[in-house]
């Protein structure tokens, strides 16, 4: 089975093509970009498909990071996947960005903590227990302060690998001999992690694919504030 993975949840735009029969990534492309993801993600997908000698009709499933992350980036990625799945008559799989980050670092034995910047001192986070093959969530995804996360990890008391765009600052500011940081190539969002995480998920029809922000978008906040007046 061929799985196309897409991640547009942060500064990186990433696409990967994974062959489940041979457990081989046939192609992968990741770009740290200042452009909008709508400008780069579909050309990136077409390029990796073309380079492998495959066609879009060869794809069996499409997996996409569906949050948390950049509101605009997530909407672009999910919309692109829905359009492709409707056109190809394929099913899709929404993968938590935090889980995808953990799967980027699946060979780590111990706790993997995904840390993504939200706003101010808040971060999106979730911790996973990894046996070196499969990270399994040990808590719910949440948006909390960095201090709260440090307290949670201290109480956990285990060696922890930090990944995500908030990992470097957290690692520097909350020094601990039990904290490790993922190497640069595995620290940020990558479609490879999205593909791997999708292997244990059930695919759904494209009209069932939704974005999970973990916090209210600006339009919802503005409406609430308006109703309070």
Image (cartoon, grey):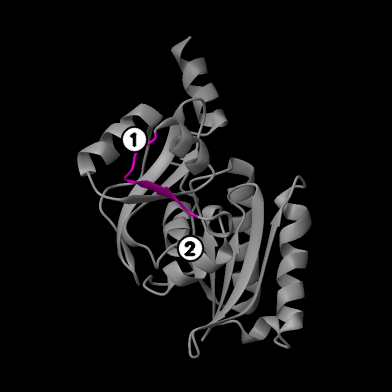
The answer to whether marks 1 and 2 mark residues whose Cβ atoms lie closer than 8 Å is: no
- Side of 155 relative to 219 (left or right): left
Q: Nearer the viewer, residue 137 or 151?
A: 151
Give the residue at x 50% y 65%.
194
Residue 25 % position (x, y)? 58, 79
Residue 66 % position (x, y)? 51, 54
> Magenta part of the protein: which range?
175-182
Give the residue at x 46% y 26%.
121
Query: In the picture, residue 184 is in which quadrant?
Result: bottom right
Disc sitting over residue 104 in the figure: 2
Q: Is residue 215 visible?
A: no
Q: On screen, 50 above or below 132?
A: below
Q: Is residue 194 visible?
A: yes
Disc sitting over residue 149 in the figure: 1
Q: Earlier in the sequence, mark 1 or mark 2?
A: 2
* Prevailing secondary structure class for the magenta stretch in the rendered image: loop
Residue 196 % position (x, y)? 46, 71
Give the residue at x 48% y 90%.
21
Q: On screen, 42 above or below 72?
A: below
What separation in Å lies between label 1 and label 2 (alpha carbons)?
21 Å
Q: On screen, 113 above or below 86?
A: above
- Side of 100 relative to 86 (left or right): left
């Amino acid at each position: 089975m061929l799985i196309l993975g897409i991640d547009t949840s942060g500064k990186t735009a990433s696409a990967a093509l994974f062959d489940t029969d041979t457990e081989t990534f046939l192609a992968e492309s990741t770009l740290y970009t200042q452009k909008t993801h709508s400008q780069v993600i579909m050309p990136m997908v077409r390029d990796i498909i073309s380079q492998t000698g495959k066609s879009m009709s060869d794809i069996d499933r499409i997996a996409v990071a569906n949050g948390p992350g950049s509101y605009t980036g997530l909407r672009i990625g999910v919309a692109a996947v829905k359009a492709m799945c409707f056109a190809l008559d394929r099913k899709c799989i929404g993968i938590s960005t935090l889980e995808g980050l953990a799967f980027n670092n699946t060979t780590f034995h111990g706790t993997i903590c995904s840390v993504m910047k939200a706003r101010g001192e808040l971060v999106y986070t979730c911790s996973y227990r990894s046996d070196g093959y499969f990270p399994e969530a040990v808590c719910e995804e949440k948006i909390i302060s960095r201090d709260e996360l440090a307290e949670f990890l201290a109480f956990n008391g285990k060696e922890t690998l930090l990944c995500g765009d908030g990992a470097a600052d957290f690692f520097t500011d909350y020094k601990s001999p039990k904290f490790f940081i993922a190497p640069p190539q595995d620290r940020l969002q990558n479609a490879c992690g999205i593909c791997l995480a999708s292997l244990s998920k059930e695919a759904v029809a494209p009209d069932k694919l939704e974005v999970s922000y973990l916090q209210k978008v600006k339009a919802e906040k503005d409406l609430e504030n308006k109703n309070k007046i």
